[in-house]
Amino acid sequence: MIKFSLSLIYSLVLFLGLKSFFGEPKTTSFDPPELTITPFAGPDVTPSPACLAVAASGEVFVGVDMIGSLGKDPNKGRILKLIDKDNDGKMDQHIEFAMVDNPRGIIAQGDKVFVLHTTFSKETGKATGMDLVVFEDKDGDGKADGPAKPLIEHISNAKYIQERGTDHATNGIRMGIDGWIYIAVGDFGFHDAVDRSGKKMTMLGGGIVRVRPDGTEMEVYTHGTRNVYDVAIDPYMNVFTRENTNDGGGWNVRFSHHIQSGEYGYPVLFQHFTDEILPALVDVGGGSGTGALYMSEPNWPEKYNNVPMMADWGRSMLYIHRVTADGPTFTQKEEEFIKLPQITDLDVDGSGRLYLAAWDGAGYSGSPSKGYVVRAVPNNFTYKAFPNVAKASVKQLTELLKSGSAVGRLSASQELIARASKQATAAALKVASDKKLPLEVRVAGIFTYAQAAGVDGIPALLAFVKEDSVREFALKALADRKNNLQNVPTEPFLAGLKDASPRVQAISVIGLGRLGHTETASALLQTKVPASFVQPAKDVEGPHATPNSAIVLPHLAVQALINLKAVDATVAAINGENSTIALWTLRYMHDQKAVDGLINAYQKSSDDKLKKQILITLARLYKKEDVYDASWWWGTRPDSHGPYYKGVVWVASPAIENFLKGEWEKADANGKKFFTDLDERNRMDIAAFGVEDKVATVEEPKVDLEKIKNQKGQVGKSSIEDVLLAINSLDGDAVKGKALFTRQGCIACHSISKGEKMKGPFMGQIGSIMNREQIAESILKPNASISQGFATVMISAKGDKTYMGFITEETAVKVVMRNVAGEVFTIKASDILSRKEMDSSMMPAGLANSLSYEELASLVTFLSQQKK
């Protein structure tokens, strides 16, 4: 009952140049009727396309990645520039723009191409990390003029890229209208990344980092996500992601709205401390989020415009998430949009042409014969050439800045900033000031002006703060660049805390945290905490993917207070009306003054409820997260108990322990249980509290080939990446594999010999079509790429009968169907009432879960030898 994809055979035929036999590839099985979707480039040019970007003028830059997520050998990647000279929707010319390994993100902006990619040592051939670099093509020949200029170096974990590949490394990049490059960082995190100013930064886990296009001002934007692959940014600087799934534990793909300074909690706050995090907007189940784009182009159909478009590799689907404002954040509704086999990325040009990349079964280490690019345009699309912004006048750029195209506005903005002239700066200010223009245009004007004018623009931005419609964006621009904050007053932000708009309130809170004036802490401490601020019950997973707009403002206020290091003000608020947010904040303040203040407040209080919350806060402070040195990673199924992954004691721990022990000794039996539960929840490991069955925090174990041979059920307990890594290291026994082919029920739906009656996909020559990794992937992910002609079909027939299976034979008078149990049914065509093709494979997922690595390797070896 193991399924293999005939689309893999089809891709191989295309690679061999036999297109005339099959015709052009069918790109999707879910084509929106308002769009025309056509092949643009095939695997002969763009195999294994991990990412792509489109210049405003229409040139497509594709990151070919023959290393993939689990490969480890260098010199297998490149950036290709694809050109459609006659604008007929098909590539006419391709140029090798630059050689890079593991390209994961691209931005094409003017004569610059920004690339995020893995780096390798020329001496050892081993990965050394990942860099964000910029190439230039000033002579316009389609090739990078010379070596790349690094903007950020070491922005991933070299140790685990060497050991595992880039499966949880740093990924997509996208530029916002604010001029920052936003970087999707997977949960490998990074240690001592360095930007062009020499600034170093470390991040434990994943999130979003941003940097200026010149490689300076690197900073963390949000934290606490898993394997985020890309970001979508709307014209108002709302940032969205579709984060990759967690292996096991019921944590799946989540769609999130990223608010600057937000903590999203993965993995240590994600399960038992969800009251403290910003939750995702939805959990949509299993999948693997990849490329992302916010579509905002005037010639696109209204129903598909002004929406985040989010690719899902695991579901082979491009989704639309329709977002609706909800206070300072959103709610959402997911819709299927375009089906594409293992879609990896997407981007749009200034004329509204959308390009999408399909991995199409290229495996976890890339393939020279799989993958392609398609183009999608609205029906009756008419190409309109995008202007050459480098040759445009300031007047022409101003008109482009006022266009309805987000691509056009960004291109005009960047060119006006690059001109560095008084005329260009004045033009941006004029656009920002014109109240007759649409809001998204004025926003583009505000951010363009702020970047062009720098500190000289502060007076004009302060004037915009007085205007209700643009106050949010003026405040954001005022606090956006930490290098320009010295003359920015706090008063507009303090006033913004009381604004009628919750979005203005949120921007004001964030801004105060960035301005750095501790005297504003008392105002931040007045932020109200909602009733939804409740910790999950013991051993219950909290609501980490349920929208909670009420928690956003206090969450941001806590983050701002932490940034301000406002220990004194926070301690002073413990016994006052703002004690809840004060104690929430103090959970993160590992400072001796915070501990002393908490103990002192406890001793002075007669409020039992408050005293309990102080004890909870002290227990949280007993340990802190160990300093991250990139020597470890928590793996694909991390210990998610929290509140720390590698908790260690610090200088104030003895004082906390002595105080808690003293209170424990005074307590009755129920009181002592409170301390025992507190110890267990916070993993203090204080022996006096008698916690049993403690679970040690350990690194994910390495595969031991000697120990695993006789163990059962390893496949079901492991992530697919770990299974494939193990299978690649095991030869397997073909004789055992043949027995497993029968024992696991594969024989019910697959035949090996051509003399047998044909059932499902024929396995007699699979070894000549697919390699071992591709075979293993098809077993582990049966829905990833369903074989042509073997999709699950549901038939309703007369006599109140229902059949489900795949069609083995069909004529004008009958349909022969075989179900998952191997039963065969013949149905008269005249009896069929309805027939529906399903999106799932007939092979149920998890049929290999009971196998050991050795057993699965044996089954794969047996199948790989079938080359008749």
Image: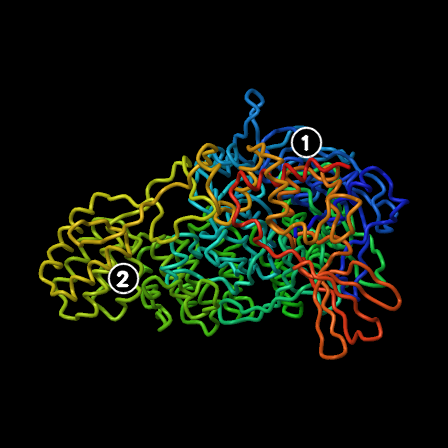
Looking at this view, is 328 or 455 the one in front? 328
- Residue sticking out furthest to the top: 123
**Quadrant location of residue 263?**
bottom left
The residue under the point 81% across, 65% down is 815
Q: Position of residue 723 (x, y in %)?
A: 54, 42
Query: Which of pointers 1 and 2 lies earlier in the amino acid sequence?
Result: 1
Label 1 environment density (alpha carbons within 10 Å; few <14, some 14–19, many ≥20): some
Q: Quick one: SS at disc 1?
A: loop
The residue under the point 77% across, 62% down is 31
* Image height of 212 relative to 572, above or below: above
The residue under the point 68% across, 47% down is 415
Q: Is residue 464 left or right of residue 640?
A: right
Q: Are marks 1 and 2 in contact (CB under 8 Å)?
A: no
Looking at this view, is 644 or 230 the one in front? 644
Q: Amino acid at mark 1?
A: Met
Q: Position of residue 511 (x, y in %)?
A: 43, 58
Q: Position of residue 843 (x, y in %)?
A: 65, 56
Which image quarter holds the C terminus? top right
Q: Quick one: SS at disc 2?
A: helix
- Residue sticking out furthest to the right: 20
Looking at this view, is 777 or 755 the one in front? 755
- Residue sticking out furthest to the left: 666
Q: Position of residue 272 (x, y in %)?
A: 36, 59
Q: Which residue corresponds to mark 2?
A: 583
Q: Identify the coloring.
A: rainbow
Looking at this view, is 217 or 796 the one in front? 796
Q: CA distance from mark 1 to mark 2?
A: 52 Å
**Quadrant location of residue 203?**
top left
Res. 741 in view: yes
Q: Amino acid at mark 2?
A: Leu
Q: Which residue corresponds to mark 1?
A: 99
